């Protein structure tokens, strides 16, 4: 038995997605730029996938560029906006994914940008007043995630867009965790750029996309054959692109299933919270329907993940908590979660494939593990 509650790390590829991809390995293996039937077959498949991805984020097809992953999409935008309009400042939040924060810190220490990191509160919500104060006429880019990967907290991106555009700054939305789980409308968010990644919503790993609003141009990260309108040279990963398109169409068609996911998540949380007084949920307000981040106060998250794994339950702790000397995740620290709780934070993340049975089986496994760990001594650092 294996219960998979780690869908924010990655998801299983949907059967329909695999079926759509397979012919592009076996039969239709042409290079999309080749001037023959097999080449045209691949090119047509890419353009269909572009339409499918565009529909997922309510964009125009020519606003979608395929990349290798969310990390690449984020890097393409951030590097492409350095020094935009002669402006040096980039504004972000303290809970962004490392593909954003680590890159920004590297650019800052290189002297290429001036970085302002806006804090979040204990609930995981962005300090909007600080955001408003941080953005000014020297700001080139504001980069904010739509949904936080550890807590699932959904940020008020449209409000931040107003602050950015009022000052002539561009807005990038890292929608990697949100895509396929909540409806996304690039226009309503007023985003200039929006990143998504296939493996978070039942497409394969190693394929992503970037929305770039019509009329905006940024330089490519590298040069070559000029694929993807010159934005992303390199022979296209046709089967993966087809998979991303199929997964986008499926996610849209199945969006109402997210209500069921949310009901299961809420039931999961209520059973765990009523089963132990050590448990508390991290992140509140608007959250993704599938994500539950629970702190078990005084428990070592690394040991708990290990015990759950031995019982067939896949979940994940904070970024560095697998090590023997656990460090609380940077996100928990940024939220001001006390170290006792932060070091015992576990992320459980469901998908539309998670069943009620799995939730019924998962909860006693967790509560038994907590009971065992509270009976055994914990390392002081936890
Ligand atoms: N942004 C967020 C919010 C993420 O959660 C992740 C992956 O966990 C990424 C970006 C990076 O995506 P990828 O794994 O496709 O590079």
Image (cartoon, rainbow, N blue to C red):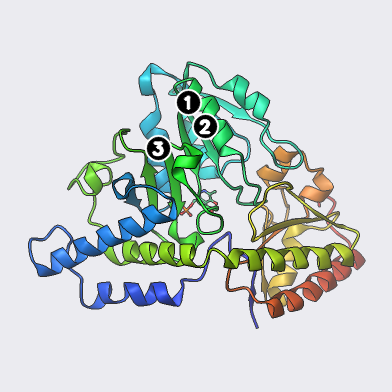
Give the residue at the far bottom of this rendering.
1
Image height of 69 relative to 96, above or below = below
Seen at 51% across and 48% down, the residue is 175
Above-or-below relation of 279 to 60: below
Q: Which element type, helix, strand or loop, lies under badge 3?
A: helix
The CA distance from mark 2 to mark 1 is 6 Å
Q: Residues within 10 Å of mark 1 (few under 14, many from 20)?
A: some
Q: Mark 1: which secondary structure? A: helix
Q: Position of residue 51 (x, y in %)?
A: 32, 56
Q: Picture coordinates of residue 26 (x, y %)?
A: 24, 78
Q: Secondary structure at mark 2?
A: helix
- Ranked by sequence position, the earlier of labels 3 and 1 is 3
Quarter occupied by residue 243: bottom left
Quarter occupied by the N terminus:
bottom right
Q: Which mark is residue 77?
A: 3
Give the residue number, with chain letter if any, for mark 1. Answer: 165
Task: Tell me where residue 261 sits by quadrant.
Answer: bottom right
Q: Are marks 3 and 1 in contact (CB under 8 Å)?
A: no
Q: At 65% from the left edge and 29% from the top edge, which residue is drawn?
A: 128
Q: Residue at x 72, y 45 (%)?
A: 332
Residue farthest left in this picture: 35
- Give the number of the mark in front: 3 or 1: 1
Q: Nearer the viewer, mark 2 or mark 3?
A: 2
Mark 2, residue position: 161
Compared across the picture, whether 336 is left or right of 257 comes to: right
Residue 216 location in percent, x, y? 32, 33
């Amino acid at each position: 038995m294996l219960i998979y509650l780690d869908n924010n790390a990655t998801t299983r590829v949907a059967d329909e997605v695999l079926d759509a991809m397979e012919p592009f390995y076996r039969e239709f293996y042409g290079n999309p730029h080749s001037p023959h039937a097999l080449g045209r077959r691949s090119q047509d498949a890419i353009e269909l996938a572009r339409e499918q991805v565009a529909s997922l984020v309510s964009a125009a097809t020519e606003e979608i560029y395929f990349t290798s992953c969310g990390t690449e999409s984020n890097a393409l935008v951030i590097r492409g906006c350095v020094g935009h309009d002669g402006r040096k400042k980039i504004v972000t939040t303290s809970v962004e994914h490392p593909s954003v924060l680590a890159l920004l810190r590297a650019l800052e220490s290189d002297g290429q940008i001036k970085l302002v990191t806006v804090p979040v509160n204990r609930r995981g919500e962005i300090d909007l007043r600080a955001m408003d104060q941080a953005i000014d006429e020297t700001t080139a880019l504001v980069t904010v995630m739509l949904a936080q990967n550890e807590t699932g907290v959904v940020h008020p991106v449209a409000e931040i867009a107003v602050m950015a555009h009022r000052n002539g700054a561009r807005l990038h939305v890292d929608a990697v965790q949100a895509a396929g789980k909540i409806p996304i409308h690039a226009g309503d968010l007023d985003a200039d750029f929006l990143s998504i990644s296939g493996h978070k919503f039942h497409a394969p790993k190693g394929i992503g996309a970037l929305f770039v609003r019509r009329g905006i141009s940024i330089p490519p990260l590298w040069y070559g054959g000029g694929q993807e309108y010159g934005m992303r040279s390199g022979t296209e990963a046709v089967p993966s692109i087809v998979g991303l398109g199929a997964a986008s169409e499926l996610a849209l068609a199945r969006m109402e299933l997210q209500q069921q996911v949310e009901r299961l998540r809420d039931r999961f949380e209520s059973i765990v919270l009523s089963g132990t007084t050590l448990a508390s949920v991290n992140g509140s307000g608007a959250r993704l329907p599938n994500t539950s981040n629970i702190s078990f106060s005084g428990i070592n998250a690394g040991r708990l993940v290990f015990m759950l794994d031995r019982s067939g339950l896949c979940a994940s702790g904070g970024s560095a908590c697998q090590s023997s000397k656990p460090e609380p995740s940077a996100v928990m620290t940024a939220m001001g979660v006390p170290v006792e709780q932060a070091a015992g934070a576990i992320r459980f993340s469901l998908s539309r494939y998670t069943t009620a049975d799995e939730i019924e089986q998962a909860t006693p496994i967790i509560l038994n593990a907590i009971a065992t760990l509270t009976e055994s001594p914990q390392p002081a650092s936890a």
